[in-house]
Amino acid sequence: MNTTNHLEGLAKRLSSLLPPSASDLREDMEQNLRSGLESGLRKMNLVSREEFDIQTAVLLRTREKLEKLEVLVEELTTKLETEDPTD
């Protein structure tokens, strides 16, 4: 289900809370609620699921590289500490 379907469903649920005497306003309310929700979400500066997944993958690769570099630095440090300074 995409964001548009979520917003439409939410707008319908909210407009269904109107009293029965306001049924002729229901369609207008749904449209206004949908527009208001879309506007509010745009202002929140949210990222898409696709962008989130991409950034998660980038972070995972970066962590893997960092862990490898940490091991390498530790190995080199150990090697330097154990070397004979007279060599």
Image (spheres, grey):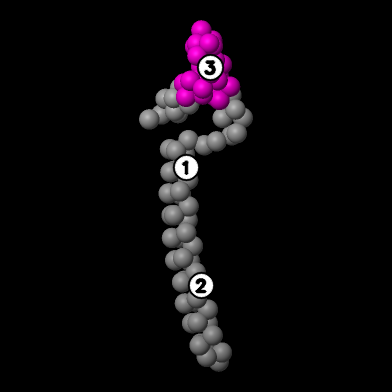
Circle 2 residue = 73
Circle 1 residue = 52
Assign a secondary structure to mark 1: helix
Q: Residues within 10 Å of mark 2 (few under 14, many from 20)?
A: few
Assign a secondary structure to mark 2: helix
Assign a secondary structure to mark 3: loop
Distance in Å between CA atoms under marks 1 and 3: 40 Å
Give the label, 3 or 2, closer to the camera. Answer: 3
Kindly identify the amino acid type of the residue bearing the numbered disc 1.
Phe
Kindly identify the residue that appears in the image at 49 percent across and 82 percent down.
79
Q: Is residue 13 left or right of residue 36?
A: left
Q: Position of residue 25 (x, y in %)?
A: 54, 10
Can residue 4 be spotted in the picture?
no
Kindly identify the residue that appears in the image at 56 percent across and 89 percent down.
85
Give the label, 1 or 3, closer to the camera. Answer: 3
Q: Position of residue 71 (x, y in %)?
A: 46, 71
* Residue extent of the magenta highlight: 12-38
